[in-house]
């Protein structure tokens, strides 16, 4: 009994010493806590009303910013092609959607790297260094994105929104340093540097959807041939109750691995933006 009480006393003493040491450490290394003050007051001047509206618009844009960035980059085409590939080869559950989305994001970062670098050097860095105003930064930052989207946009799709929005007057011919029109095959090269982004983005999106479906169709062809051949062989052998998809899947995977499919698919997606 005495030994038990002695052990209990030693444990309590050690616990007390540890507590005192921890308190001394906390007091010795005081971590500054930032003061956060959020207040909502009534606006009394027109400037305060304008500032409140700007803040509301900024929060709205920040909420929609991920969707805006995704729809104005190469992500649309890449994610659709990869999704159609999963359907074509028949591995809907074998490859998680998180893997497909991650691959699409990194391929997007790779293809958009020159554009993002140009935006950073021409707009973001000068603005952060207070060399240009916010308006100039927005104009210079939107130009590389506009050039990228217009390069991938079909003229027919852009003309649709130009005609519907009656924006034909914003189109002008490109001229060289001497003021002469730059010709290609005897016709003037047309630029759309003054077309508003609200017309460029939707035309870019529908062009990307069309091109993604075209690439998806080409992906389906070899796998459909394997399905047809497998189904015909099973019917000839009288195995009508055996699902052809179950037998054809290993051959699809074998074909895809033998031709180094992931390398070819990634190369095709990247080169489609060059």
Image: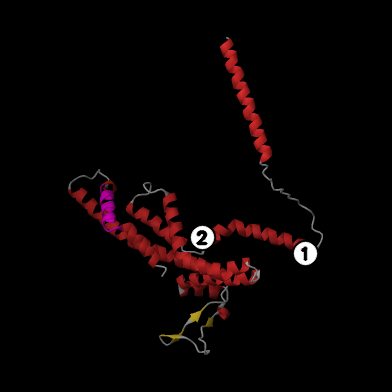
Task: Quadrant for residue 194, please give it.
Answer: bottom right
Q: Is residue 202 visible?
A: no
Task: Quadrant for residue 77, please give it.
Answer: bottom left
- Compared with residue 119, is residue 43 higher up or lower down, i.e. above or below? above
Answer with left or right where residue 22 lies relative to residue 108.
right
Instruction: Say which residue appears at 55% left-offset and 58% top-offset.
Output: 66
Where is residue 188? Give x, y as percent.
Answer: 47, 85
Instruction: Say which residue appears at 66% left-offset and 70% top-offset.
Output: 133
Give me the disc on residue 173. none
| Gap in angstroms between the C-alphas marked 1 and 2 | 34 Å
Instruction: Say which residue appears at 73% left-offset and 62% top-offset.
Output: 51
- Compared with residue 139, is residue 246 higher up or lower down, i.e. above or below? above
Label 2 belongs to which residue?
A: 70
Where is residue 18? Give x, y as percent.
Answer: 62, 29
Q: Is 242 part of what is drawn in magenta?
A: no
Label 1 belongs to which residue?
A: 47
Where is residue 161? Give x, y as percent.
Answer: 53, 72
Instruction: Say which residue appears at 29% left-offset and 58% top-offset.
Output: 260
Q: Earlier in the sequence, mark 1 or mark 2?
A: 1
Q: Which range of residues does the magenta coloring cover?
A: 247-260
Secondary structure category for the residue under label 2: helix
Secondary structure category for the residue under label 1: helix
Quick one: label 2, few (<14), some, or many (20+) residues within 10 Å? few
Main SS of the magenta segment? helix
**Which residue is most to the top?**
1
């Amino acid at each position: 009994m005495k030994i038990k009480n002695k052990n209990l006393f030693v444990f309590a003493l050690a616990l007390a010493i540890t507590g005192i040491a921890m308190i001394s450490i906390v007091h010795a290394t005081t971590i500054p806590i930032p003061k956060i003050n959020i207040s909502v007051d009534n606006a009394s001047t027109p400037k305060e009303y304008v500032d409140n509206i700007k803040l509301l618009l900024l929060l709205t844009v920040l909420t929609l910013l991920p969707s805006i960035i995704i729809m104005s980059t190469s992500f649309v085409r890449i994610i659709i092609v990869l999704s159609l590939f999963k359907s074509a080869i028949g591995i809907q559950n074998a490859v998680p959607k998180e893997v497909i989305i991650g691959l699409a994001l990194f391929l997007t970062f790779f293809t958009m790297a020159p554009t993002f670098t140009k935006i950073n050097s021409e707009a973001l860095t000068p603005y952060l260094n207070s060399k240009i105003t916010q308006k100039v930064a927005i104009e210079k930052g939107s130009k590389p994105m506009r050039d990228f989207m217009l390069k991938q946009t079909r003229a027919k799709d852009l003309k649709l929104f130009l005609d519907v929005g009656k924006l034909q007057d914003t189109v002008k011919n490109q001229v060289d340093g001497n003021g002469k029109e730059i010709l290609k095959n005897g016709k003037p090269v047309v630029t759309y540097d003054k077309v508003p982004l609200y017309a460029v983005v939707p035309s870019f999106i529908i062009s990307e959807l069309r091109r993604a479906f075209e690439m998806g169709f080409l992906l389906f062809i070899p796998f459909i041939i394997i399905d047809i051949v497998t189904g015909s062989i099973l019917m000839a052998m009288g195995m009508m109750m055996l699902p052809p998809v179950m037998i054809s899947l290993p051959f699809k995977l074998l074909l895809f691995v033998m031709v180094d499919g992931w390398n070819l698919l990634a190369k095709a997606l990247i080169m489609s933006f060059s």
